[in-house]
Image (cartoon, rainbow, N blue to C red):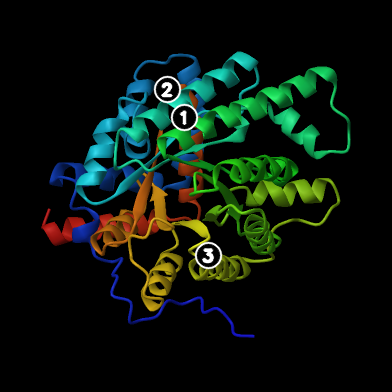
């Protein structure tokens, strides 16, 4: 069987080291501020201290903490505290041929009132997206629409109580409300993946939504975490199911966000881990998933949601080799706001269909998101050192 190369074809014209294109959108002053921020975030001890103290400091309303966070890490990674605040970021990205995926930063809600509020906010985001050609998609989390305990119990063999059955029905109603409005307005909805102990529940719910709303085009996308050893097979099975039932598959491809949690859970429960044995296995599986989606692009709308330079180059190479239109709506790239600008804007400059994930929400809501960004990127294997190196390269190129 032919193996999938993990290295992109060297003939691919894209150059992710081109910092002039990557940072064209920011001024000299902003670039120097960016260098300072990423230098701080590259210090693991400072990040460890900051992520431990900041939530408590904000809760206690300590002087200057809120303004300091908003001027630095919030401004870098978040589009604003409310939906209208994001318009400035949306317009700036579109100026450089980059689309926006709106992501309301609410998660792990419990009361029915909170869950209904998340649904209402997501519908508002869909309506804003419909008024912007540059916002084709919004993102949402099932963990923002249902209590985690319910999602976990739905995946178990335990019967739901009458109250829990009612909560399940309200969850399905919330999802249908979101997807129906998106269908009416022609806006995509990407539904995030979560931990394995609730992911089967989420997969089943998203499959139901795709079967209902993806008949004539792709509105709903599921998320496939390719650091799991079963997800490539799951992707292929979901595609076969979609073909057999007459709808198109929406697939956002990520490596995964819960590696340590998954492995710890497996160890604590004395069960096999769902994750691949090493990063090389994940990289190979991810590229195989990209190849499968590109080869089946007529019936799968996919998103290479990655900060990995080789995988982004590989998908670009596959699109070019198969003589597919670079901006075909079924073949997409995306990265998080504030990261991997060298990937995003070089892809955009080359004519590919690329977007930034733009989270938004009140500071207290997005703090968990910001902490994840800081922690994962200050790790030895994270992207922060690469980011800082690129920023310093552009500072030097500009002679600052």
Q: Which residue is mark 1?
A: 366
Q: Is residue 360 visible?
A: no
Task: Report the quarter where the N terminus lies.
Answer: bottom right
Mark 1 neighbour density, 10 Å: few (under 14) some (14–19) many (20 or more) = many
Residues under numbered marks 2 and 1 in contact, where contact means CB atoms less than 8 Å apart: yes
- The residue tagged 2 is 362
> Which of the pair 20/139 is nearer the observer?
139
Q: Residue furthest right?
A: 158
Q: Quadrant of residue 387?
A: bottom left
Label 3 or label 1, whichever lies nearer to me, is 3
Q: Which mark is residue 293?
A: 3
Residue at image coords 73%, 56%: 274
Residue 193, x across and y down, in percent: 60, 45
User: Looking at the image, which is closer to me, 237 or 11?
Assistant: 237
SS class, disc 3: helix
Lateral position of residue 347 relative to residue 139, left or right: left
Discs 3, 1 touching: Cβ within 8 Å = no
Q: Considering the numbered disc 2 on the image, is that residue within a helix, a strand or a loop?
A: loop
- Report the Cα–Cα distance between label 2 and label 1: 7 Å
Image location (x, y in percent) of residue 367: 48, 30
Question: Which of the two labelled residues, at mark 3 and mark 2, occupies the earlier sequence position?
Answer: 3
Mark 3 burial class by Cα count in 10 Å: few <14, some 14-19, many 20+? many
Of the numbered discs 3 and 1, the one sitting upstream in the chain is 3
Q: Is residue 240 above or below residue 265?
A: below
């Amino acid at each position: 069987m032919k193996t999938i190369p993990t290295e992109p074809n060297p003939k691919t014209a894209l150059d992710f080291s081109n910092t002039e294109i990557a940072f064209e959108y920011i001024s000299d002053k902003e670039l120097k501020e960016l260098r300072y921020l990423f230098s701080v975030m590259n210090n693991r001890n400072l990040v460890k201290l900051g992520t431990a103290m900041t939530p408590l400091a904000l809760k206690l309303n300590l002087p200057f903490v809120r303004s300091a966070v908003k001027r630095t890490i919030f401004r870098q990674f978040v589009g604003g505290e409310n939906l209208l605040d994001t318009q400035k970021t949306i317009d700036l990205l579109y100026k450089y041929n980059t689309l926006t995926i709106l992501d309301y930063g609410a998660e792990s809600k419990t009361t029915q009132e909170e869950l209904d509020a998340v649904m209402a906010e997501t519908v508002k985001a869909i309506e804003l997206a419909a008024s912007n050609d540059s916002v084709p998609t919004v993102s949402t989390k099932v963990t923002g629409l249902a209590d985690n305990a319910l999602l976990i119990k739905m995946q178990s063999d335990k019967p739901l109580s009458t109250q829990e059955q009612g909560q399940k029905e309200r969850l399905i109603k919330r999802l249908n409300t979101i997807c129906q409005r998106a269908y009416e307005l022609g806006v995509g909805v990407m539904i995030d993946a979560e931990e394995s102990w609730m992911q089967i529940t989420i997969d089943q719910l998203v499959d139901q939504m795709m079967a209902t709303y993806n008949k004539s085009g792709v509105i709903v996308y599921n998320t496939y975490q390719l650091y799991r050893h079963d997800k490539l097979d799951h992707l292929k099975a979901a595609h076969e199911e979609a073909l057999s039932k007459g709808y198109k598959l929406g697939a956002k491809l990520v490596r995964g966000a819960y590696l340590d949690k998954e492995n710890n859970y497996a160890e604590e429960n004395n069960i096999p881990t769902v994750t691949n044995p090493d990063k090389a296995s994940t990289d190979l599986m991810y590229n195989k998933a990209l190849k499968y989606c590109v080869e089946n692009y007529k019936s799968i709308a996919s998103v290479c949601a990655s900060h990995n330079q080789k995988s982004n180059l590989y998908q670009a190479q596959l699109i070019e080799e198969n003589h597919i239109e670079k901006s075909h709506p079924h073949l997409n790239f995306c990265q998080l706001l504030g990261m991997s600008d060298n990937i995003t804007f070089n892809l955009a400059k080359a004519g590919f269909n690329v977007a930034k994930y733009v989270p938004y929400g009140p500071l207290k809501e997005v703090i968990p998101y910001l902490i994840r960004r800081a922690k994962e990127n200050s790790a030895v294997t994270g992207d922060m050192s690469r980011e800082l190196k690129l920023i310093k390269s552009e500072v030097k190129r500009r002679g600052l």
